[in-house]
Image: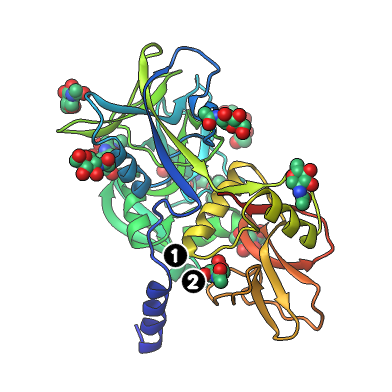
Amino acid sequence: MDTMAFLSILLLLCAFPLSNAVGRLRKFYLIPRNVPTTNTPLNICKLQNYTDFVTVYDEDDNTELYTLISNISLPRSALIGAHTINTNYTSKWSNGDDVTFTQLNETCGGICGAAFRANGSWELLPYSTKIYFICYEEGVGQASDKYILILLNKNWTEAQLYCRKNHNDLVSIRNETENESVKSIIKDSEFNFWIGLLYDNIEWFDGAQSSYRNYSKIPDQEKQTLLTINNSKKTWIQGSKTGSFNALCYKSFIHVSSDEMSWEDAQNYCNSNASGLLQIESQNDQIETERELRRQKIPGPVWIGLRYKFTSGLWIWANGSFVESWINWKGGSQPEHQMSQYCGAIEKVNGVFKLSDKDCGFKFRVLCEKR
Ligand SMILES: *[C@@H]1O[C@H](CO)[C@@H](O)[C@H](O)[C@H]1NC(C)=O
Ligand SMILES: *[C@@H]1O[C@H](CO)[C@@H](O)[C@H](O)[C@H]1NC(C)=O
Ligand SMILES: *[C@@H]1O[C@H](CO)[C@@H](O)[C@H](O)[C@H]1NC(C)=O
Ligand SMILES: *[C@@H]1O[C@H](CO)[C@@H](O)[C@H](O)[C@H]1NC(C)=O
Ligand SMILES: *[C@@H]1O[C@H](CO)[C@@H](O)[C@H](O)[C@H]1NC(C)=O
Ligand SMILES: *[C@@H]1O[C@H](CO)[C@@H](O)[C@H](O)[C@H]1NC(C)=O
Ligand SMILES: *[C@@H]1O[C@H](CO)[C@@H](O)[C@H](O)[C@H]1NC(C)=O
Ligand SMILES: *[C@@H]1O[C@H](CO)[C@@H](O)[C@H](O)[C@H]1NC(C)=O
Ligand SMILES: *[C@@H]1O[C@H](CO)[C@@H](O)[C@H](O)[C@H]1NC(C)=O
Ligand SMILES: *[C@@H]1O[C@H](CO)[C@@H](O)[C@H](O)[C@H]1NC(C)=O
Ligand SMILES: *[C@@H]1O[C@H](CO)[C@@H](O)[C@H](O)[C@H]1NC(C)=O
């Protein structure tokens, strides 16, 4: 690595923490005891004005939730938002991408991951199978650098953890071009490699698409999931349909308006109905914003608290502070204009959320920050 590259990585590390831990836009809460799990439409989290039962997105979430239940009485367990639904198997990419490109429609009778064969075809294997796998690195142009073959035998869950720790995530393949690129880097290997496609019948109450799993045994049908710890073991298990449990809920501090409005009206709306327009202050905020938009299936564009200041030629946040350069602009760099009526929105471009500049008079839904 040359000095410049090293310096810029160092700067990046200083600019924002790499942790995806729950930050200012999403928080966890424990509701103690006596949550009935009988076939009731009652959602205790919503009744208490939280957003929903918690969705576990990654290992940091999982660890924080275990900490939250570490002091409650035995057996230390609490409901999370995962439940199994009959035999309705669905596929999801580890990184949250929409599944638009796959020919797999079989099942493997449990939780499966997709593996890439040397000839390019994909197959489903039980996710406990230990094979090699492929991670990816965002923002790298060349396929040979973007896709990283990891020659370690790991099950799908371990492979996901490994890629998330050391690179971005397990690879997702969104179209024929990417399929061919991955094929070209595994060349004539005789091995199978995990890719980031998970296939199971687990759903999250809040509609999220998280592929993080902490089960130690294959879940049964039609049950809710408990996070349990005792002195010897941390795992997700399934609760019976009767009985009462502690509940783990979360609150999202992102509000999405149902109406569309101009940026100025959006600012008034968020100031009077929330604590202002949403400002994306860090990589963590960006991740939480994307999760919320994916969960609510909103491709955008939606307004955020970002505006172009013609007098200085700079983009500023609604509160007047300048925008850091890390921000994820559509097209790769921040847009410049001769006129001032440009405002910032977030929208999905080729399946990826990017910031973009729009005429402030256009009418979109808006993201506000809740308190
Ligand atoms: C939830 O919010 C509603 C409406 O704001 C309020 O009437 C109710 O008391 C709240 N419930 C709890 C448990 O805080
Ligand atoms: C657990 O209890 C200990 C001792 O009472 C306390 O110091 C700690 O903050 C508690 N942890 C949590 C997560 O509540
Ligand atoms: C704790 O975990 C062990 C090992 O899985 C299990 O045998 C035991 O029943 C658990 N205890 C409680 C109180 O859940
Ligand atoms: C990827 O390409 C191979 C041929 O190189 C093809 O057999 C396979 O079906 C493709 N995968 C998908 C999901 O279309
Ligand atoms: C699903 O499988 C059936 C038969 O096994 C096949 O005819 C069909 O093309 C498959 N669908 C997709 C979307 O791959
Ligand atoms: C790829 O290889 C597998 C077995 O290794 C075979 O079942 C499959 O038909 C092959 N696919 C193509 C497109 O050659
Ligand atoms: C994956 O491997 C880890 C470490 O060996 C193990 O703890 C875990 O239970 C395995 N998961 C599955 C689904 O086999
Ligand atoms: C579940 O998560 C905990 C904490 O992240 C980890 O220590 C444990 O090995 C995981 N268990 C399984 C079965 O994946
Ligand atoms: C605040 O929200 C209410 C209900 O949606 C709406 O009627 C009102 O106009 C909003 N305030 C502003 C300033 O937009
Ligand atoms: C304005 O917002 C930015 C980014 O959200 C934040 O870092 C800064 O502290 C805020 N400044 C003021 C004066 O509130
Ligand atoms: C394939 O997907 C990538 C990533 O979204 C995109 O950049 C590329 O243009 C796509 N290629 C085709 C042929 O659709």
Specify whether 1 is left or right of 252.
left
Depth order, front residue of 213/206: 206
* SS type, badge 1: loop
Task: Give the labeled residue for mark 2.
Answer: 140
Q: Amino acid at mark 2?
A: Val
The answer, for residue 173, to whether it is visible in the render is no
Q: At x 70% / y 71%, what residue is drawn?
A: 307
Q: Quadrant of the N terminus?
A: bottom left
Instruction: Give the CA distance from mark 1 to mark 2.
Output: 6 Å
Depth check, front residue: 172 or 297:
297
Residue farthest to the right?
Answer: 361
- Residue 217, quarter of the rendered image: top left
Cβ of mark 2 under 8 Å from ligand 11: the answer is no
Residue type at tag 1: Glu
Describe the element under mark 2 as helix, strand or loop.
Answer: loop
Marks 1,2: beta carbons within 8 A: yes
Q: Quadrant of the rendered structure where residue 348 is?
A: bottom right
Q: Position of residue 126 (x, y in %)?
A: 36, 34
Residue tagged 1: 137
Q: Categorize mark 1 by other alpha carbons within 10 Å: few (<14), some (14-19), many (20+).
A: some
Q: Is residue 210 above or below residue 132?
A: above
Residue 89, how many percent across, how many down? 51, 28
Query: What is the tally of numbered marks visible in this picture?
Result: 2
Task: Answer with left or right where residue 341 lies relative to residue 330.
Answer: right
